[in-house]
Amino acid sequence: MTIRATNQADVIPLRPLPAAADPAPPALPPEPLWRDLVGEVLRRERRAQGRTLKDVSEASRISMAYLSEVERGRKEASSEVLAAAARALGLSLADVLALAGERLVSLTAARSRTRSRSLGTVGGQPPARTAGPAGPRGGVLLAA
């Protein structure tokens, strides 16, 4: 055996490679970030009032560049900054957070529906399980 042959090792993958015929599972939408949701609310409210970024920036005493970054979800604003932006828009901090929370709930529900479909659940509900002799973990999976 040559030195070259002894230096070549078999590569063993840590995870099995997917078969070419297996379709890839559908990708789930990414988990929403709070800063994106809050920024979306601020931008939507500002535009609904027909106000410019400069106008809200001056009213809130937040730099226009920073407010823009917050609206685009690039910066995680402090509660003081969010409260100032909310006041400039005629809202309370609670209003902004409630609107962001509502959006989070709707996105999470949509994400759950997508996940349910990709996992093959029936009617958006997980498949029924029955407890077998080993209890819930050793149960039988019933599929329709």
Image (cartoon, grey):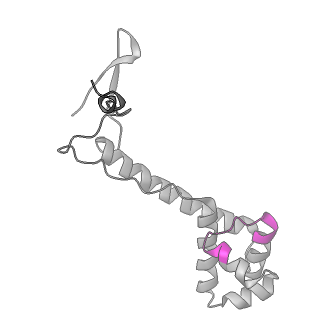
Residue located 40% across and 53% down the image = 28
Q: Residue furthest top?
A: 133
Task: Classify residue 120 by image quadrant.
Answer: top left
Residue located 71% across and 90% down the image = 54
Specify the quadrant that holds the N terminus.
top left
Residue 12 in the image, given as x and y percentages of width and height:
34, 30
In the image, is residue 136 part of the stretch drawn in magenta? no
Task: Classify residue 19 by image quadrant.
Answer: top left
Depth check: 131 or 19 in front? Answer: 19
Q: Is residue 140 left or right of residue 21?
A: right
Relative to 125, say whether 135 is above or below: above
Relative to 26, say whether 72 is above or below: below
Relative to 9, say whether 89 is above or below: below
Residue located 74% across and 80% down the image = 90
Residue 121 in the image, given as x and y percentages of width and height:
30, 40
Residue located 73% across and 91% down the image = 55
Residue range in magenta is 69-82
